[in-house]
Every structure is written in structure tokens, then in C-alpha cells.
Image: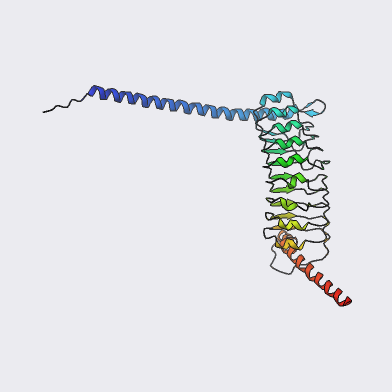
Amino acid sequence: MTGVTVCCGSVSSIKALWETRIKKTKDELKKDKEQKDKRAVGRLTGAWEDRIILAKLKEKVVTEEGRTLPPALVQLSELQEWQLHRVGLQRIPRFISSFQSLIVLDLSRNSVTDIPKEIGKLTRLRELLLSYNRVSDVPEELGFCENLEKLELAKNQDLDELPPQLSNLKKLYHLDLSMNQFTNIPECVVKLPSLEWLDMGSNRLENLPDDIHRMEKLHTLWLPRNELEYLPDNISLMKSLDTLVLSKNRLRDIPPLMEGMSNLRFVNFRDNPLTYDITLPDLKEVVDEEEDNREMFGREFMHFYIQEARKRGYAVLNMYCVQTC
């Protein structure tokens, strides 16, 4: 008979060893979690401290050949967002280039007169909001902000052109140039490959570029309060366009080719001296004034105007033939 010897001492030792390892692992995990929690709290606290300090900076705009920000701001170089409104800021300091982590720079409603070329160092910047200032010139270095997605320069009074280098902003999808002095849509804007939303209302636009259809992704185009007298036929090739506002211009006619713009959902021709006075038939019962405005100056109006223009043009042609034949 063969005996089997069980080494109880060895089993106990192994069990104790594993229990020790398990406890150690649990302790390490607990310690790691505590450290992560502390870091998270630290980041949150740091973020709030930065916001508090930034809020206090609003009260410390200093005068150095114009109201600007104190150099002490460089101590917050890890800031990701600036929002300084209505503080009378006149100059963006050149040390703006120190803020490599900046994602949002919102200085709307101040008195900023120019944008320093150092802005081009902010390669992580996604939003630059400078509406309601006094900017008259945009530096070509802004074209280096390769991650810029949103640019707002509305109501800067004397702004009437943009540098060609802005066509390098491959990710820009939102552009507001309203209430300025542009007489045409800049070529660099037409070349922006990702542009989806463009507002150039309340400028002095006299015409639209013939190659406007190159803005293939544009779905919203605001052009009210300009001096447009006609629309190029190629506007009908803008397949993504679904909102087109043309109120208060000098348009005499609507291009017949626009009738084929099946994606166009809202269009407004209100307050234009169109050649024909068109009244829509009672296609459906209108429930409120807002819907009535949309009906009278929207897609239905556009289609009915084009159809009526064709009828009248045909009648005039027939009359001319009768008189001359």
C-alpha cells in the first residue's frame, strides 16, 4: 500500500502568500484611486482658481498706450479659455502666444483695434470671437491656427477684406462677417473646404462670386441688407444649401435654375424690388403671421415667381412675334 503524504505546512504557506498579495494589490488599488481622486479634485480646484483669477483680471485692465491686460497673466499659461467681455480692452497683448493650451478666445464687445500676428502661435485654438470691436485688419498669421473651427468678426466697422492665407483654415465651419464693409465675398472664404455656416448680412455686397458653388458644404447663407442686384446661376449648384436669406437687397429677379434646388428649405426674398408683383394662391390655411411670412417669401413664393416669370416672358415673346411677323 502506497501512502500519500499531504504537506499541510506548504499549503498554508501558499495560502498566506496569496492572501498577502491580494491585500497588497487591494491596498495599491485603493491608494491609486485616492491619488486619482486627489488629482481630479486638484484639476477641478485649479480650473476654478483659474476662472476666479481670470474674473479678477477684468478689474485689472491697465493703460499702457491703450487698455490691455497685465503681463502677470502669463502665470496662467495653461488656461484653455478666455472670456472677457465689456472691459474696454483695446489691445490683445503680444504675449498671447504664451497660451499654447488656449482653445477658446472670446473678447467680444470690447474696443480691440487689431489682432497681433502672434495669434498664429495658438495652433490648438478652436474658437476666436471678436465681434463688436474695432478691428480693421486681420493678420495673415491667423491662417496658421489650423484647428480653428469658429471665427466671429461681426460689426468691426471698417473691416472690408481678409488675407488669402485664411483659406488654410481647413476645419473652419462657422464664419460671421456681418455688419462690416465687405463689397464681395473674399476669395479665401469661397475656398474654405469645411465651411457650413456663413453670415455676411449688413455689408455692402454688390455681387456674389460666379464660383459660389465651390462652397460644397455650406448649408446656411445669410445675406440680408446688402446691395445685391442679381444672383449667379451657379447658386443653383449648391447642393447642401438649405437656408438662404436675401431680404432687403436690390434683386430684380430670381434665377429660374433655383427651382431645381431640392434641398432648399427656407429662403427669404422680402423687401426686394422684384420685377413681378406676385400673390400666392390659397395653397393652404395659414395659422399665424410667422408662417404667413415664410409662405409668402419662402420656397413656395420662389417657385411661383419663377413659373409666373416664365409665363409672362413667353407672353411677351409671342406678342413680339405677332407684331413683327
* Image mark count: 0
Residue 301 lies, with reference to residue 77, above or below; the image says: below
Q: Position of residue 179 (x, y in %)?
A: 80, 45
33 horizontally vs 209: left or right: left
Find residue 137 and report its image quarter: top right
Q: Which residue lies furthest to the left in this view?
A: 1
Colour scheme of this structure image? rainbow
Q: Position of residue 268 (x, y in %)?
A: 75, 57
Residue 176 lies, with reference to residue 30, above or below; the image says: below
Closer to the camera in the image, 276 or 122: 122
Closer to the camera in the image, 212 or 225: 212
The residue at 52%/27% (across/down) is: 38
Residue 101 lies, with reference to residue 10, above or below; the image says: below
* Residue 177 showing in the rendered view: no
* Residue 121 showing in the rendered view: yes
- Indicate the quadrant containing the C terminus: top left, top right, bottom left or bottom right: bottom right
- Indicate the quadrant containing the N terminus: top left, top right, bottom left or bottom right: top left
Residue 142 lies, with reference to residue 247, above or below; the image says: above
Find residue 63 and report its image quarter: top right
The residue at 60%/27% (across/down) is: 46
